[in-house]
Amino acid sequence: MAQHTPAPTRICPDCDGFPAVAIDTGTLHDDGTRATLMVTCRRCQGTGTTRTAAPVVQREHA
C-alpha cells in the first residue's frame, strides 16, 4: 500500500530554524556561571517553522 509523504515544513527565514538562543551578557553570577538571556524568534514564536504563504492571485482590471 502506498504511503503519503508529509508536506515539507518551511524553515523560518528570520531564525533559519534555530528559534531559541542564549545570549551571553558578559557578566558573571556569584557562583562563577555566566549570566545569559534566552531569546526566541519573533516571527515564528520559537517554533522554527512558518506557515506556507497563500498563493498570490492577480486580477485583471476591466
Image (cartoon, rainbow, N blue to C red):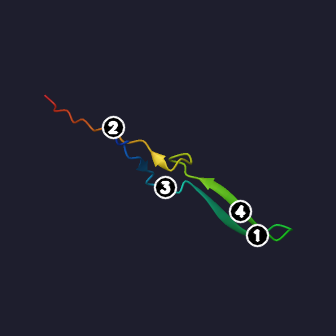
Element under label 3? loop
Element under label 4? strand
The amino acid on which the numbered mark 1 sits, given as a three-letter code, is Thr
Between discs 3 and 2, the one toward the N terminus: 3
The amino acid on which the numbered mark 3 sits, given as a three-letter code, is Gly
The numbered disc on residue 49 is none
Residue visible at 55% across and 45% down? 45
Near mark 4 (Cα within 10 A), the count class, few <14, some 14-19 or many ≥20, is some
Alpha carbon distance from label 3 to label 2: 21 Å
Between discs 3 and 1, the one toward the N terminus: 3
- Most foreground residue, 7 or 24: 7
Dot 1 corresponds to which residue?
27
Label pair 4/2, CB-CB below 8 angstroms:
no
- Most foreground residue, 23 or 4: 4
Alpha carbon distance from label 4 to label 2: 38 Å
Element under label 2? loop
Between discs 2 and 1, the one toward the N terminus: 1
Alpha carbon distance from label 4 to label 3: 21 Å
Dot 2 corresponds to which residue?
54
From the top left corner, tell me how far across and down residue 13 is, in percent. 43, 54
Dot 4 corresponds to which residue?
36
Residue visible at 76% across and 69% down? 27
Dot 3 corresponds to which residue?
17
Label pair 4/3, CB-CB below 8 angstroms:
no
